Image (tube, helix red, strand yellow):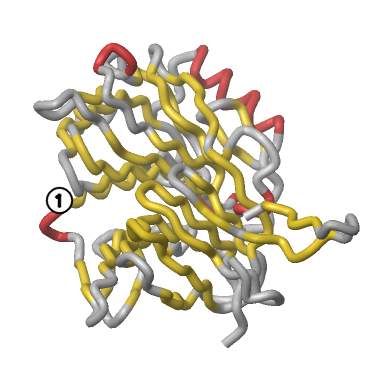
Amino acid sequence: MSMRPVKDIWQSTPTMEGAGVHLRRAFGFGKTEEFDPFLLFDDFRNERPEDYLAGFPWHPHRGIETITYVLAGAVAHGDSLGNRGEMGPGDIQWMTAGRGILHQEMPRGDAQGRMHGFQLWANLPASLKMTAPRYQDISSADVPEVTDDDGTHVRIVCGEFWGKKGPVEGVAADPRYLDISVPPGRRRRFPVEASRHAFAYVFAGSGTFRDASQGLPVKTELVDADGVEGPTVYDATNRSLVLFDSGDEIVVQAGDEGIRFLLVSGRPLQEPVAWHGPIVMNTQAEIRQALTDLRDNTFIT
């Protein structure tokens, strides 16, 4: 097995979306080649209802798939196909926008006013950009969970892991999406296919993602007294996004409070990306056509 070195790490940054929802964005709306086939990742964690209740009113999507994973509170949703529902803690929704859909997502806090979840955007290949829209709504009870002897716990949102398969199927990016908890002080290895791009997002506790060449605990340059740079240290705290280089496994050392993170990987599409907000196609001509369809009320067929 070859360990994946850490290519980069950074903190998700505060931003505002929808009708005024305060959230944190780990990546998106920029250079996303290193994340291909993924386009955007948001952490919508909040304890102030006034910062999220306005929600995400009706808006279009085309050419992508959106994956919403709720940890606390609830998200009511509806779309132009007549689908309606609500996601609660542990629930997942995988929406294939395909040729076009209009939908809304309205968050609601729990009894303490807490709202927490994630949204990941996955690109669709050119051959499926105009496929028929569809939903996969998964209840928390249907998400397989496994616990190892040392207490390491994994929820399998999508893909296969430790002999179990996640409930989301038929997704073009063929991703593996895992929610991993490692107990305090434990050091664990997790396989990731070498053909995939991979990232981790830490949302509780802290830990160290080991660099392959140094075996050391991100982005702290050690400088000796004589001014000579030492090895790079890779420490990940809450809300850290860790981008991995090539290899077929990652190694994490949990800190004193343990660590919980999402580990996401997918096979890159290696196709051109033309981007206009929630519409992602391959060419600017396709973007112009989508905007024309919206203007002419032919976006939904």
In which image quadrant can residue 67 be found? top left
Tag 1: amino acid: Ser
In which image quadrant can residue 162 be found? bottom left
Q: Residue 173 appears at what percent x and percent y?
A: 49, 59
| Residue nearest the observer in this picture, 294 or 263 | 263
Residue 279 as seen in the image, left or right of residue 255: right
Q: Residue 216 appears at what percent x and percent y?
A: 62, 70
Residue located at (31% from left, 39% from top): 117
Residue located at (40% from left, 56% from top): 262
| Residue nearest the observer in this picture, 257 or 244 | 257
| Residue nearest the observer in this picture, 202 or 187 | 187
Can you say whether 267 is above or below 109 in the image? below
**Does the rendering let one see residue 4?**
yes
> What SS does tag 1 mark?
loop
Can you say whether 39 is above or below 199 in the image? above
Q: Which residue is mark 1?
A: 139
Q: Residue 36 appears at what percent x and percent y?
A: 61, 54
Give the farthest residue toward the bottom.
Answer: 1
Q: Residue 200 appears at what percent x and percent y?
A: 49, 56
Residue located at (55% from left, 56% from top): 235
Residue 236 as seen in the image, left or right of residue 110: right
Count of labels in the image: 1
Residue 96 as seen in the image, left or right of residue 234: left
Look at the image and tell me in which quarter the C terminus lies: top left
Residue 193 as seen in the image, left or right of residue 149: right
**Does the rendering let one see residue 170?**
no
Can you say whether 189 is above or below 231 in the image? below
Look at the image and tell me in which quarter the N terminus lies: bottom right
Give the farthest residue toward the front.
Answer: 225
How would you rate the neighbour count of disc 1 (Cα within 10 Å): few for under 14, some for 14-19, many for 20 or more?
A: some
In which image quadrant can residue 161 be found? bottom left
